[in-house]
Amino acid sequence: MLEARVIHCSVRRDPRSLYEMLWRPESFALWASGLSSASLERDEVGWKAQGPEGPVRITFTGHNSFGVMDHWVDLGDGRIVYVPLRIIPNAEGSEVLLTLFRQPDMSDEKFAQDEVWVRQDLATLKALAEGSPLS
């Protein structure tokens, strides 16, 4: 089993409204710094992007009523990174939870850097969701 960390942020926005704002793959580029809006594009197979370490393919969970926004990042070298992402209700607001899995042979330092990166991305997501609508 891979080591895992659940990283979350609280967002002052109704969960259904937040999900509807964020579920589209195009919206990920607005807050997920590993994807730039210039590089994320749809093709006949799915989505491709320029990741931090080179070109990647991304498969996103389809629209659903459960707040699930999981995605799989194919690094192109046989490795596929699964990224579970959920929006769940918290009173009038929401919790956004992302599970970060430590990849095989990943150093302590790299895993810690990835966690910092995810926290920054979730802070950006929170600022966007609470500050201005994306849709």
Image (cartoon, rainbow, N blue to C red):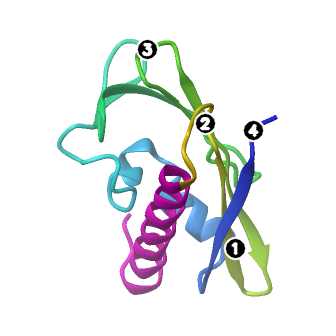
Could you tell me if the residues under marks 1 and 3 are in contact, i.e. CB atoms within 8 Å? no
Whole-angstrom CA distance, mark 2 to mark 3, is 14 Å
Amino acid type, callout 4: Leu
Using the image, tell me which numbered label, if any, was put on residue 95: 1
Using the image, tell me which numbered label, if any, was put on residue 2: 4
Q: Earlier in the sequence, mark 4 or mark 1?
A: 4
Could you tell me if the residues under marks 3 and 4 are in contact, i.e. CB atoms within 8 Å? no
> Which one is in front, 65 or 131?
131
Residue in view at x 47 percent, y 84 percent: 130
Residue 59 on image: x %, y %: 52, 28
* Residue 113 lies within the magenta run: yes
Residue 48 position (above or below residue 100): above
Q: Is residue 135 left or right of residue 23?
A: left
Whole-angstrom CA distance, mark 2 to mark 1, is 25 Å
Amino acid type, callout 2: Gln
Q: Can residue 20 be spotted in the picture?
A: yes
Residue 47 position (above or below residue 18): above
Q: Which of marks 2 and 3 is nearer the N terminus?
A: 3
Circle 3 residue: 77
How many other residues sit within 10 Å of disc 4, few (<14), some (14-19) or many (≥20)? few
Q: Which of marks 1 and 3 is nearer the N terminus?
A: 3
Q: Report the span colored magenta.
A: 109-135
How many other residues sit within 10 Å of disc 3, few (<14), some (14-19) or many (≥20)? few
Q: Can residue 62 be spotted in the picture?
A: no
Residue 106 on image: x %, y %: 55, 39
Disc 2 vs disc 1: which is toward the camera? 2
Using the image, tell me which numbered label, if any, was put on residue 103: 2
Could you tell me if the residues under marks 2 and 4 are in contact, i.e. CB atoms within 8 Å? yes
